[in-house]
Image: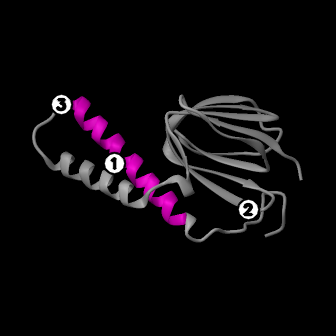
Amino acid sequence: MATIRLDIVTIERVVLSEQVNYVSAPGVDGDIGILPRHTPLITALREGELHYIKDGVEYDFAIGGGFAEVRPDHVIILADSAERADEIDEQRAEAARQRALRALQETPRSDADFVRLEHALRRAEVRLKVARRRRGATRVSGPDEAA
């Protein structure tokens, strides 16, 4: 099965660098699926779940937005934040979600505060979803395999 290099990088660290079979990233206009030999593109990313498949196993990340550069043999994710599913503390993510919800219910605030709180809420919700999914590690068929 063909592979493509996936690098996930934040300002603090290189989160991942390995050959994978498939990548799904949360583009601002919808999720994008990336296979080896993909047409080159650069796109903005929103907060969301990034998945990749390697040797039939799916791996999940929560990312906090950023950019993706896709080349036929390489995907570079420049993320504002990126956490592997097993790095996420569910209790901390739930506490962050509750704080953001409470703050959004308070009155009044500036547009900038509202946008910041919405971002914090979406990030916490993505982190919770990814963390909860890791409980049941799954083996999946890759795009080139029979289901």
Q: Is residue 38 magenta?
A: no
From the top left corner, tell me how far across and down residue 103 is, in percent.
19, 46
Q: CA distance from mark 3 to mark 2?
A: 44 Å
Residue at position x 69%, y 29% in the image:
41
Kind of residue indicated by mark 1: Leu
Where residue 86 is drawn, which disc sits there? none
Image coordinates for residue 69, horizontal then vertical, percent: 67, 30
Q: Name the residue beneath numbered marker 2.
A: 57
Please tell me the numbered disc located at residue 121.
Answer: 1
Which quadrant is home to the C terminus?
bottom right
Q: Nearer the viewer, mark 3 or mark 2?
A: 2
Q: 67 or 14: which is nearer to us?
A: 14
**Which quadrant of the figure has residue 38?**
top right
Q: Residues within 10 Å of mark 1 (few under 14, many from 20)?
A: many
> Which residue is outermost to the right?
1
* Disc 3 target residue: 110
Amino acid at dot 3? Ser
Instruction: Looking at the image, tell me whether mark 3 or mark 1 is earlier in sequence order.
Output: 3
